[in-house]
Amino acid sequence: MSSDLPDYYFRVRENGAFVFRVNAENQQRRVEMDQIAVVNLRKGEIKPQGDRQLSDRDMEVIQNWMVERQALLSHRDIDDIHRAVDYLNTTAHWAQSKATDDQLEAVTDALLLAMHDLRTVLARKKADRLLKAGK
């Protein structure tokens, strides 16, 4: 394993991470990871592990990670939406040029309902934005 290990490791979980301090400077030259905190991104919480006191450096590293992680997740969200647009275009091409009647029968109702729902939400949100801009 590389000797250039970071001082902290974040084991990502659904709504945050477990935070570990990495120590490779021991007699056995083994990597030790000591859990120091739990992060909840949704609530913006940092909870020290057990009765541990987090140092100013610990807090700074964790808060920086939280900002970077939120930015990454936000980027992934919009990237997923751009991919959905691509999938819709691919689906339209498939339906027009390749799909059999049986395949279309299997997916048409679900697609029409999903697209209707999406159109309704998008139209309402656009109207809300236009009303706000007009005020």
Image (tube, grey):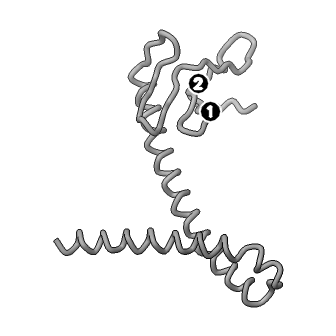
Question: Which disc number belongs to residue 20?
Answer: 2
**Viewport quadrant of the C terminus:** bottom left
Residue 125 pos. (x, y %): 37, 68
Q: Amino acid at mark 2?
A: Phe
Q: Amino acid at mark 1?
A: Arg
Q: Is residue 56 above or below residue 83?
A: above
C-alpha span from label 1 to label 2: 8 Å
Q: Residue at x 47, y 51 (%)?
A: 71
Q: Residue at x 53, y 58 (%)?
A: 77
Q: Quadrant of residue 132?
A: bottom left
CB of mark 1 within 8 Å of CB of mark 2?
A: yes
Q: Residue at x 64, y 31 (%)?
A: 5
Q: Is residue 45 above or below residue 78?
A: above
Q: Quadrant of residue 122?
A: bottom left
Q: Which residue is mark 1?
A: 11
Q: Quadrant of residue 11?
A: top right
